[in-house]
Image: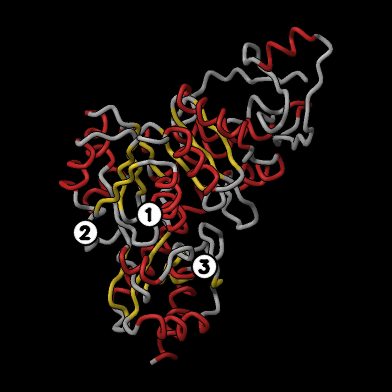
Amino acid sequence: MKIEKKATGLALKGDSTRVVWGGEQENLPYRATQVPIVTSAAYAYNDIDVWHDVAQGEEPGFIYSRMSNPTVEALEQKLCELESAESAVAFSSGMAVISSVLYSFLSQGKRVVSTRDSYGGTNKIFEEFLPRMGVDVCLCETTNYAEIEHEILQGCDVVYLETPTNPTLKILDLARLTQAAKQVGALVIADNTFATPLNQNPLLFGVDIVLHSATKFLSGHGDVMGGIACGEESLINQVRHYREINGAALDPFSAFLILRGIKTLALRVRQQQANALAIAEFLLNEPLVETVNYPGLPSHPNYDIACEQMRGFGAIVSFVLRGGMPMVTELLPQLHYAHCAGNLGAVETIYGPARTTSHVENTLEERRALGISEGLVRISVGIEDSEDLIADLQQAFTYIR
């Protein structure tokens, strides 16, 4: 299959241009205008020596789709463009990429430092699975930099960061913590799912590997699962080897759907975060709301850091209702322009409490230990008209009063 490349001499700069064209110009055979879905499990070679060279990575090509696939490779190249990365590798889900990256670099006797605020599935890896492997896990208070830096400087192999955090939306200073990690030679991994590559690029702050649950904003339509890791080629090759042997490869049709979704990422995020700010400001004045979490609010405790390292504040808002879970169960069913579901990043607005979304894997006691209130509701704000979303919230609050 001969692939034609346009020699334009132009660098892709604008967000909208990069999400549309990034990684695709070299993957359009047969003069197609869209990346084709290549469903072949294997790829044939008449020349055994060439076959061997491709299998050893000495020549470009494909051998078996668990290892590499043309459609999946186009997605990986697009993420390299968006995250300014040398290499990327795609997985079958967000948790597949998180767990695989951690397992690629942690083993018995090694130490990882992270924070208490992280996605519930990630927290389970830290609390349950890594200790079984003999990994020393240290979870610090999320914005206590003195504690985090102290634990890093005690010696560690990996520092794992998530910013903004899910679902409390705390912001971590990537440059500061990366600098501490480099003093002890630790690898820094950052989950960039909430920010998206348009709002934040952790690699530019010294992070070694950046992760995305492609199920969320990258796909943007709630109809596919996937995960992606980006970073320096030598590191990503280790993660790719782990994926090849453990098998959590992304299938080509899912890669196609994520590629298609990314093309509207800039448009979607622009509308979503404008809506998110409007909803956050509305919730600040609602008497039934105890706390509003959104890094784009000047009242947010990490607002200054967010302004320094983010180009936009994202589309996730969380708030704590006075009255706890009983009030949550009253409010959410009254909403008309919202799904109550365990996903985020879609074009539709999605609501959910932590106990059924981000931290469904955790017990009540575990959530309390993590500082997650039973009255906390996470909103993944969609692309609807902000006036309609706010009117919907108004009528729901009026009802429960």
User: Extreme right residue here?
Assistant: 46
Circle number at residue 350? 3
Residue type at mark 3 is Ile
| In this picture, residue 282 sits left or right of residue 342 | left
Residue 341 appears anywhere in the view: yes
* N-term mark: 1 or 2: 1
* N-term mark: 1 or 3: 1
Please give the residue where the numbered disc 1 appears in the rendered image: 118
- Against 120, residue 68 (above or below) is above
Q: Residue 89 placed where, x, y %?
A: 55, 33
User: Secondary structure beneath disc 1?
Assistant: loop
Q: Residue 80 placed where, x, y %?
A: 50, 31
Q: Residue at x 40, y 85 (%)?
A: 327
Q: Which one is in front, 188 or 382?
A: 188
Q: Residue at x 56, y 71 (%)?
A: 339
Residue type at mark 2 is Pro
* N-term mark: 2 or 3: 2
